[in-house]
Image (cartoon, rainbow, N blue to C red):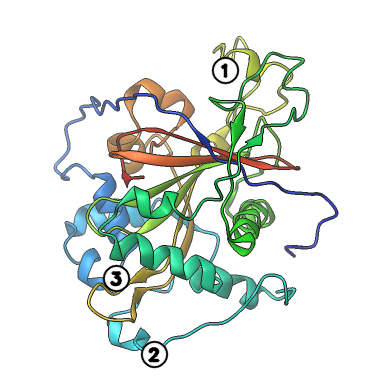
Amino acid sequence: MVKLSLPIRFTILLSLSLTASTTSFSKSKSSSIPKATPSDLLSVLGPTSQSSTVNPLVAKQLKSCFKFLVPFTPRKSSTQFQDYSIRRSLKDQNFKTQRQQNELIWWPPESVLELARLAVDSGGDPDAIYRALDPTVLPVPDVEGCKEYRCDLTRTPYGRRFISQELNSYLRYLFELIVARGASVGLSVSLNRYDLFHGHFFLATESGRLGILFHAREYPAYDKYVFPYNMGYCQKGSNVTYDDSMNFRNILWLAPLPNKSAKGWEAPGVLVVLDARPDGIIYRDIIPEYVGFARTIYEGLHLHLSFLCYSLFVQADIRFGSDFGRL
């Protein structure tokens, strides 16, 4: 069960910091199957009008790497959603049943739907999302001994949060649902600064669809035999074991996709773990070779907005990336 009324206090912070990064897809393995792209991955998870454009062999292999935390419910026609209207609030209801929790992914609260439509109606303009942020600047607190270990999980010591408190609460709900359901697909995950504590917003380049790419198991413990990689100060004290569950460290949330020409919706929301096993197409084609050992997928072709979540607060920063889309 996902409990939304925890006795702890969450804070949403957004720290504006620009850095440059590049992504290299230099893995070259002979195969008769065309190379998959991040755009293909998003299309397969989209409406039929998008999924039908993906090479059937690529689509089949991508689907074999999807571990859904919430059942996938694609639709064939956007007309089914023309009159769909939802008015649910995280504050007013407990959402105790699995069906109710699933519906919060398929059709989130109104504040989330508004942000999703804003993303598409703006033509994928990141500024449209930034304007949804509260201008108040908040300090980043010391969490779980970061300062003691000289660990900086954020690029700046300050941040912001969304104006909508319901939207902030929904982000918390996503983290909690991932933790609650991860074990069902083989992902043992916890909310702490070594494991699941952050995700990255993005806008899909072609559709403008709003999404978040979560990264779990961020700082595995150093082990000279199993994980002989020094990841800096933030790795110190980690009890995260490097094992096969690293294949499941990328978790993707997609907001419902609005219809560009009407008030309806093309597709409901999605929450899925992306299996980056070494013999799979995601590892082969989408995981950059230089982070293959960490199984890391990156999320933005232009700007993206990332945020950090601990047991007490959520923080975010903005930087440049190069995979799924922009924000």
Labels 3, 2: front one: 2
Residue 267 against residue 65 in the figure, above or below: below
Q: Amino acid at mark 1?
A: Phe
Residue drawn at 42 percent across, 74 percent down = 73
The x and y percentages for residue 304 are 39, 41
Secondary structure at numbered mark 3: loop
Can you say which quadrant of the picture contains the C terminus?
A: top left
Mark 1 or 2, nearer chain start: 2
Q: Out of 308 and 61, give the one closest to the viewer.
A: 308
Tag count: 3
The x and y percentages for residue 219 are 61, 25
- Residues under numbered marks 3 and 2 in contact, where contact means CB atoms less than 8 Å apart: no
Residue 175 against residue 243 in the figure, above or below: below
The CA distance from mark 3 to mark 2 is 17 Å
The CA distance from mark 1 to mark 2 is 52 Å
The answer to which quarter of the image holds residue 298 is top left
Mark 3, Cα crowd under 10 Å, few <14 / some 14-19 / many 20+, is: many
Q: Please give the label number shown on residue 47.
A: 3
Q: Please give the label number shown on residue 227.
A: 1
Labels 1, 2: front one: 2
Task: Please name the residue that numbered disc 2 is placed on.
Answer: 83
